[in-house]
Image (spheres, rainbow, N blue to C red):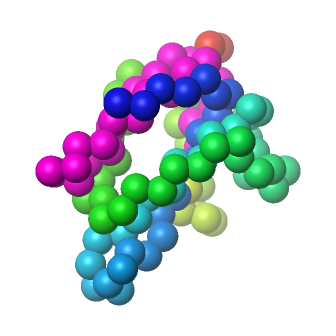
Amino acid sequence: MLQFEAKSVVVSRKPGKDADGLWNCVVALFDENNPHLKARVPFKSLELEEVVKVRLHELENVSFYLNGNDLVINNLTRIDIDFDESRRIITLTGEQNF
């Protein structure tokens, strides 16, 4: 499991190796809320290949933006990223400060 201090996270998808196969998941970490509104560059970006799904646990402030197919998680103090490689599932947990 990876753990980061971040204010927000944007979870996105991008095509994988095979157009008909599984997608890759990009988890971008930021020092401020709503970075997508200001076109900010993440301080860290992780790309996980051939992901089946992303699970969110114990996170309350999560927005799904239809315009870009992105999940934005704001008000974080910490994010934990666990990737089960055998099942190809990402689980995001963390702490938020409201």
The span picked out in magenta is: 71-96
Dominant secondary structure (helix, strand or loop) of the stretch shown in magenta: strand
Image quarter (top left, top right, bottom left or bottom right) of the N terminus: top left
Identity of the residue furthest to the right in this view: 38
Query: In the displayed structure, would residue 91 be above or below residue 24?
Result: above
Please state if 44 lies on the left or on the right of 16 as rendered.
right
Residue 55 in the image, given as x and y percentages of width and height: 32, 41
Please state if 43 lies on the left or on the right of 19 as rendered.
right
Residue 35 visible from this viewpoint: yes
Please state if 39 lies on the left or on the right of 71 as rendered.
right
Image quarter (top left, top right, bottom left or bottom right) of the C terminus: top right
Please state if 10 lies on the left or on the right of 79 as rendered.
right
Residue 50 in the image, given as x and y percentages of width and height: 30, 65
Identity of the residue furthest to the bottom in this view: 19
Query: In the displayed structure, would residue 82 be above or below residue 26?
Result: above
The number of numbered badges drawn on the structure is 0
Q: Quarter-wise, where is residue 80 in the image? A: top left
Residue 90 in the image, given as x and y percentages of width and height: 32, 44
Residue 82 in the image, given as x and y percentages of width and height: 33, 36
Query: In the displayed structure, would residue 33 be above or below residue 47?
Result: above
At x 23% / y 43%, what residue is drawn? 84
